[in-house]
Image: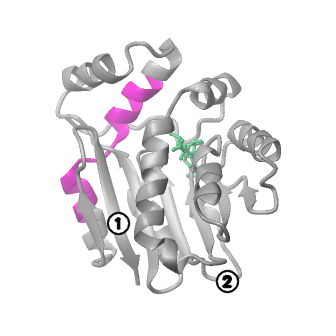
């Protein structure tokens, strides 16, 4: 099945609200734990960037999991940034979490960042090489990177079967977004080709379950 693009940004207020209300606790905490277990000992006072931070749940879990790192969340959807800011204020973590409402392809930092994470953003970006290029140019040499996203199924029937298995109890809007995201995602071979194209040879690709890929390692 060929890739079918979905809208790049989740900038509809209702769509952002439904996504923010969904329970991604297990997936998000697992993502944060994996990153902190692998790299926590080199993140003292580090500046970590979360690309496509959405409603900010991972940002908050990350700063709670490490005592001194600080993080910048980037998302080009103003409704998502507004939800994230409210959650950060509510958790009184504004001194450790900053937000930028910008496309990751357009973001620059005056100092290279110490580490980069991103969950479920890559499939939104029409040209995936721009996503990996942003990581490559933003990070300091040797920076740890953890990226996770969905795998594109082989058919629309297979995509629907994943929705039925994992999201049948979720609101219709969330099921629709999940389905469209699966169709917009990349296969394992796609991701391997993108990494090779940008010579990101120290990033390793893994497939931990039936619907996700993970890229982990360092960027040089
Ligand atoms: C599926 S959500 C994932 C949110 C969050 N990372 C999580 O795991 O819950 C993807 C987010 O990426 C944002 N996004 C899509 N394309 C983007 C881009 N080019 N630059 C910045 N944000 C983008 C969307 O607006 C949306 O909030």
Report the residue at 64% width, 59% height from top: 63
Report the residue at 59% width, 36% height from top: 10
Image vertical order of residue 37 relative to residue 182, above or below: below
Report the residue at 73% width, 37% height from top: 83
Q: Residues within 10 Å of mark 2 (few under 14, many from 20)?
A: few
Ligand 1: quadrant of the figure: top right
Q: Which residues are magenta?
A: 176-193
Magenta stretch, overall SS? helix
Report the residue at 41% width, 84% height from top: 220
Residue pointed to by mark 2: 111
> In the picture, residue 150 is in which quadrant?
top left
Of residues 48 and 156, the one drawn nearer to the viewer in this rendering: 48
Q: How is the image coloured?
A: one colour
Task: List x then y, in percent, for residue 198.
Answer: 34, 74
Q: How many marks?
A: 2
Q: Pick the quarter of the image with the N terminus.
A: top left
Tell me the element at label 1. strand
Q: Residues within 10 Å of mark 1 (few under 14, many from 20)?
A: many
> In the picture, residue 94 is in which quadrant?
bottom right
Q: Is residue 185 magenta?
A: yes
Distance of mark 1 from mark 2, alpha carbons?
Answer: 22 Å
Residue pointed to by mark 1: 216
**Disc 1 or disc 2, which is closer to the eye?**
1
């Amino acid at each position: 099945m060929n890739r079918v693009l979905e809208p790049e940004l989740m900038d509809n207020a209702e769509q952002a609200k439904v996504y923010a209300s969904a329970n991604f606790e297990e997936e998000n905490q697992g993502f944060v734990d994996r990153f902190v277990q692998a790299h926590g000992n080199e993140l003292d006072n580090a500046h970590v960037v979360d690309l496509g931070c959405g409603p900010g749940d991972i940002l908050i879990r990350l700063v709670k999991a490490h005592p001194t790192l600080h993080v910048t969340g980037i998302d080009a959807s103003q409704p998502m940034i507004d939800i994230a800011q409210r959650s950060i204020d509510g958790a009184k973590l504004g001194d450790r979490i900053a937000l930028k409402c910008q496309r990751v392809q357009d973001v620059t930092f005056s100092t290279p960042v110490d580490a980069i994470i991103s969950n479920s953003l890559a499939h939104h970006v029409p040209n995936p090489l721009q996503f990996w290029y942003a990581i490559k140019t933003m990070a300091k040499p040797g920076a740890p990177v953890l990226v996770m996203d969905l795998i594109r199924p082989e058919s629309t029937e297979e995509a629907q079967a994943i929705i039925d298995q994992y999201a049948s109890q979720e609101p219709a809007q969330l099921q629709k977004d999940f389905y469209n995201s699966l169709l917009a995602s990349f296969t394992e071979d796609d991701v391997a080709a993108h990494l090779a194209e940008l010579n990101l040879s120290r990033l390793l690709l893994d497939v931990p379950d039936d619907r996700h890929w993970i890229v982990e390692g360092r960027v040089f």
